[in-house]
Structures are given as structure tokens and as C-alpha cells.
Amino acid sequence: MIKSNLIWANESNKVKTLDDSDCLLILTTPELLASQLFHFSTPAKTYIEQVFDDEGFAGNKGQCVLLQGLKAFKTSYIPDTENSGKNKISQQLAEVKRVLFYGVDFALFEASDAPNVSSRASTLSKTNDPSMVNRSSYASDSNSAFYSKSTSDLKQTNAPAFRYLEQQFDALFKKLKSVSGTLEKLSFMALSTTETASNDPVNTIASHSPFLSALLRSYFKHGYHFKGYKTNNSSICNIQTRNGNDNANNEAINQAPDIRGTLSLALDAKHFNNAQKRLVSHTIRYESALNAAMTWAKDLAHMPANLCTPDYLAEQALHLEQSFNTVSCDILNESALKQLGMNGYLAVNAGSQFAATMPILRYTAKGLENSPPVVLIGKGVTFDSGGITLKRSPDMRHMIYDMAGAGCVLGVIQAVATLGLNINIIGIVASADNAIDGKAYRPGDIITMHSGKTVEVMSTDAEGRMLMADAISYAKQFSPSVIIDIATLTGATISALGHKATALFSNAPALESALVEAGELANDRCWPFPLWPEYQDAITSQHADMMNAGINSPGAISAGCFLSRFADGTPWAHLDVAGTAFTYTKSLSATGRPIPLLLSYLSSCAVKNNQ
């Protein structure tokens, strides 16, 4: 795992930061180069200018120069012109292993921070309904994005500034990895003097929450690494289990996270007031919690199905209960599920050697004990063979990712508990294993669901909706304000949207709009699909209340129509993340989405609860 480190710097601990750093990143422009080079010793400055001249570096956007092994920095910032016999510049210099100068478009740091909302999101109104979010207060509070028209790029794309900024930082970290191969122990340092503080990029990044969020999120994304299970992996040492079990197999799969990189942000404390300092700290805390959640979700998704079983996911849910006093957990085993009539849920798991489980997590904010919760349901099919409707074999190994929705719910609750958001949440991990043997359910079977509705099975590979339908029906007993399910449900979603946007289905326009806007703010976008009555005809059955797959119908919409019948009158949204939670056919491709979207939405609900 990687982390961020905030340093409110004076001259002495700036030098220590440089000594501890593997690489100093200097964002620059043609206009800033001279003032930034002032901070280097005279020999280092001469050498750097020669390299700039040799490589044609002028500080233009996208240009970079990597310099190795400099004892380069003054420990006193007294200009040479002011140096007299009484004021001598210290000869002690900081050890800097690498320095990367990277040219940026400074116009993006001068963007207006006036929030703007999309036309779809502008339909939101101020109301006590948690699905109707007051975004204006949230936009000025934490990781909100805003629109900017100050660069030609933004004018051409009309893209939110946050998305544009993250793209720029993505380019930076890709460039750094290409020239040095590592993102460990990096430092961003404000090189401003009193005269140049207002236009120093690092100070400006920290002063604007969207800039800092984009920087941190991009660094965390590019620094992620799945350790895996090689016996010669040097990072696997001093193994600690999540749940305290000393079993050898559990030790192998419960490796303690190692810190693989740290981004240190050294800021001039004198240029920030107390409110600005609090905002910087809040943003770093938010992004760190988000990163930890996404890292955990990605690690779970990358685990092989013989290790990440339904029981293992249940253990992870119990780990959350043990880690936070605001989280409690109940585990429904197969016997309890059978007594509840969760027959669709159990049918999916009937052919597996592993028992199905349904962990139920409760996060309760102080003072909101009696408030209706937001229910999150994550699809946790730890391996999806397709059952008797067998998937084609070449890419079946990627079906370990079919539990990405469950990993998302676990990660979101961890992040919410870490941040202490003022909201009640119930998280349901709908976990099963879709395998084949003589007990497996079959095409043509008719199953009575938890709700009492009957389903004719057309495809055993349409198992996710069977699992989620029973979980949605069960969740209504909690009288939730909204239900949101997250599932890698249909390949048809990939055909429609590729890997760029999550498909969104909802029976509540206000909830749909709130999720669309949350995705825009978090640069984790979703796109609404219709659930018109005309689409319901495709799942009409002659023998039961409905079929679990449509005939000659758009697959993603048919799945949404199916789930909508179990939500009934409860405000509900379905996020089909088949294209965004991982990249199909690519190994180690879990993304941790849509955790940013959901945490953005839940944060906005918490802001509403605070008012």
C-alpha cells in the first residue's frame, strides 16, 4: 500500500524532507524556472542549466528532465545579491537523489473555483430526502470538482476541472515511471519565497482541494501493486492475519499491507491560514481513506477463487467489525438463508463445494441511530463458471472478478468508518459460488424467490440477478432511505459503454441525478439507462412471474428490469460495473470502482445530515 505525508515545512525540515526523499518533483513553467533554480547551489544550478540546454527543456507543458544525485539545495534562502560578510549562505546542502522537473500548464492552477453542476444534476432540490443532495455546501467542503474555462483544453472538452487535472497528473506519474521505474518516496515541495508564494504550483495545488485530490488520487492509482503469492516475494514477511487466525493457509492470504511508496507534500506553513490548513488536512485524510478502501477492494478482487471464498469474504466483514466500534456485523449462513426463503440466492450456490454466506454490516453514526439507512448491496460471486450455461473457457479465469461489487461495499464501509461520516449505512455482501455438479440449478427450473415471486430460469449464467434480487427483497425490512446495488452483472454493459462509465438504472429520478453528479465530482462517471415498461415485456414468462433473462432484448436493460421488480416502491439504483470494476480479458485489472462515486454520494448525504 502507498500513502501520503503532509509536512508543514520550515527551512530545517525542508532539508530533512529532501534527505529522506528518493525523488523531488518540481512542477514548473517557463516563467517560474528562474525563481525555482534560485534554491539550488551555484554549481548545481550551472549543471542543471546545461542539462536544460542540452535537452531543449524550457518548462513547457509535458516536458520533463530527470537529474540524478545532486547535493543541490541551499539551507538558507538569502539571495546571492544580498550576501555580505555578515550574512553568509550556509554551505550545508541537502542530499537529493533525483530531481524531476515537469512542465505544466499553469493556467489550470488559475481556474475559477466556483462550482458548477451538470444539467442533469441541476434538477436536484433542497429536501430532507437523502437521495436529494444539497451539493453547493459539499462542493466547497472536501473533494468536490469544479468547472473551469481558463484553458483551451477545457474549452474544447467542457470537461470538469477535476477530470482534466487528474489526466495531467496521470501523464506526470506515467512519465516518472518511464524514466525512473519507481514511485517510492516522492516529495512535492513548495520552492517559493515570500515574493513568489502566490504563484508557486505546490502551494496552489494544496490551496485548492480539487487540485490536491487529483494529485493524490493519480499518485495512489499509479503506485498500486498487487503483491501476489510468489514464495520469493521479499515483501511477504512478518505476515499478520486480518482476523487473528494462525492457520497457515490464512496467513498466506492475509498478508499485512506493506508501504510501497510515500508522497510527501512539504508546504510553507506561513502561506496558509488555519482554515486552509484544515482543508488540506481534510483532503489528504479523505483521499487516503479512499485509497485504502480501493486498495483493499482491488486486492480482494485479484485473489484467486480457491482462496477468496464466500467464507473468506465473511471473515473480511468481521474484520471491519473488529476494527471500528461504529461497525457491527451479522453473518447469515446457508441454514439461515434457507429459513428466510432465499431460494434464488441459494440456487446460485447449489453446485458449489463452498457454502454461501450473506454478511450484513451496519455502520451507525452517533445521534442517527433511528434514522433510515442507505443500503449498499454488493454482488460477491467469488467465481462464475456460468453454471450449466457454461461460459466459454478462454476468459473464464477472469471470473474471479465477479465479486468486485462485494469488495466495493467492504471498502466503502471501511472508508466511511475511517472518516466518521454522519450517515447510517447497511452493507450486504451477497456471496456465493456459481459452480457445476449434480445439485446445480438448471435452465427451465422455476424458483420461488424471497419476495414470493416466481422466476423461470432461462440461463444459469444470469446468476447475479438471482442473488441480488433476493438481497434487495431482504433489504427492504430495514426501511431504507435508498437501496443501491453494485454488481458486475452483464457483458452487455461493456458492449454499450466500454470500460469508461458505469451503467446506472434507477426507479427514483432524484437518486439517479444524485449518483450522476457524484460520479462527475469524483471522476468516476455513470450513465443512466431507461427502465421503460416496454422493456419489461422481454422477461415475461408463460410459466412464472418472470424469466431471469430476456429474449431478443438488450441484456443490461433486461437485467435492470428484473431487479426493479424486487425493489418495488423503495428508491433503488443498480450500478452495473461489469465494464468499470475491472478490464475484461486483462489480469490484475481491478480498478476499485465505483468506490469514488459512492463515497462522493455518501459524503454529500452526510453533509446534508449535518445541516
Image (cartoon, grey):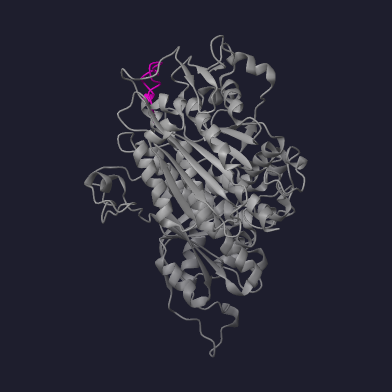
Q: Quadrant of the C terminus?
A: bottom right
Tell me the quarter of the picture where residue 421 sits.
bottom right
The image position of residue 522, as x and y in percent, is: 61, 46
Magenta segment main secondary structure? loop
Where residue 230 sits: x, y (%)?
25, 42
Q: Is residue 136 left or right of residue 590?
A: right
Residue 386 sits inside the magenta stretch: yes
- Furthest residue toward front: 339
Considering every residue shown, the one lying at the far bottom of the view is: 86
**Residue at horizontal 55 percent and vertical 66 percent from the top:** 37
Q: From what the image shows, is residue 462 above or below residue 508?
A: above
Q: Is residue 459 above or below residue 130?
A: above
Q: Nearer the viewer, residue 376 or 237?
A: 376
Q: Residue 337 location in percent, x, y?
A: 42, 33
Residue 413 in percent (x, y) is at: 50, 49
Regarding residue 135, the answer to whether it shows in the image is yes
Q: Nearer the viewer, residue 24 or 250?
A: 250
- Residue 167 falls in which quadrant of the image? top right
Any magenta on residue 46? Answer: no
Front residue of 559 and 168: 559
> Is residue 176 in view?
no
Magenta range = 381-396
Q: Is residue 608 above or below residue 359?
A: below
Which residue shows up at 46% across the image and 55% down it?
66
- Residue with the most extreme top position: 542
